[in-house]
Amino acid sequence: MPFLDPKRAAAIAEPDLGPPPPPQPLEMHVPTLHIQPRKPRSELTPDGNGRFRIHDGPVIAHVERDGRMSFEDRSPIGVSVASPRDINRRLKAWIANPFAEAPADIPPIIQGRFELTDLAMRAAGQDPYSSRKMELLDRTRDERMGLAAAENASNLKDALARTPAALDRIWRGPGDVRQKRRLFFTLWDECAESGAGDVIATARAVRATIVAFIRRNLPRGSRAGYTGAELDALNARRTSRERFDPYWQESATSAQQSP
């Protein structure tokens, strides 16, 4: 058996595939665009002074600043008159061609509304629009909750801002000093101790304002200040969990500073 030529054997083992292909252009990376879904258009129409209204067929919904909703039903019997502009358009069209049909976009001069079913249901003591009202409540729930949260936050800020002036009016106004001390305690005792985080934070700030006012104007040991027996009597009838003692921190600080 003859031996194969080494060059021929290499050509058989590694066939010639021709010149390499030309380099391909770099692939361009196209970033994926994340399109945010468009927010649904609000149905609430401003009605002045932070209030809103919604016209939904025969129902008019009134929305307060805090999100509360009330309803007003349109009368099942009514007559409406076209605007002067529409009347003028209709007259000009009729003068131009008295025998032509009225264009579809021109409303009638006078049109009426008579809902016999509504009248029958009202006579039977039923609300003909109850399902429509429930749908309105559900459809606007999230938006009205947002209004309620914003109004609550605004009220909390106002309450905190008004506290110093209210305390000063009580202190400078007429009345017995003991009655004023009891009123300061009542204001402190009525501050919320549970609920939403912003409510608790505001209540604590109001309490701190009351305590600071008492220490400044009714200091411990003065004729205007609370006595220990008075504090015990007030705490015996408090409704809050926390004990009312505007001088407690002062006592603790004095105890730490004493040798």
Image: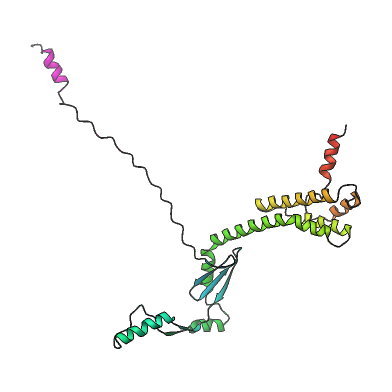
* In the displayed structure image, the side of residue 9 where residue 175 appears, left or right: right
Figure quadrant of the N terminus: top left
Q: Is residue 245 visible?
A: no
Is-magenta flag for residue 109? no
Main secondary-structure element of the magenta-colored stretch: loop
Figure quadrant of the C terminus: top right
* In the displayed structure image, the side of residue 141 where residue 212 appears, left or right: right
Which residue is rendered at x = 84% and y = 52% of the image? Answer: 235
Along the line of sight, which residue is nearer the eye, 68 or 214?
A: 214
Which range is magenta? 5-28
* In the displayed structure image, the side of residue 79 where residue 11 appears, left or right: left
Is-magenta flag for residue 23? yes
Residue 6: x and y in percent read 13, 13
Residue 86: x and y in percent read 40, 80
Please determine whether, in this image, residue 200 is positioned above or below residue 175. Answer: above
Which residue is rendered at x = 54% and y = 60% of the image? Answer: 143
Looking at this rendering, what residue extends furthest in the bottom direction?
98
Looking at this rendering, what residue extends furthest in the left direction?
2
Would you identify the image quadrant in which residue 16 lies? Answer: top left
Residue 136: x and y in percent read 52, 67
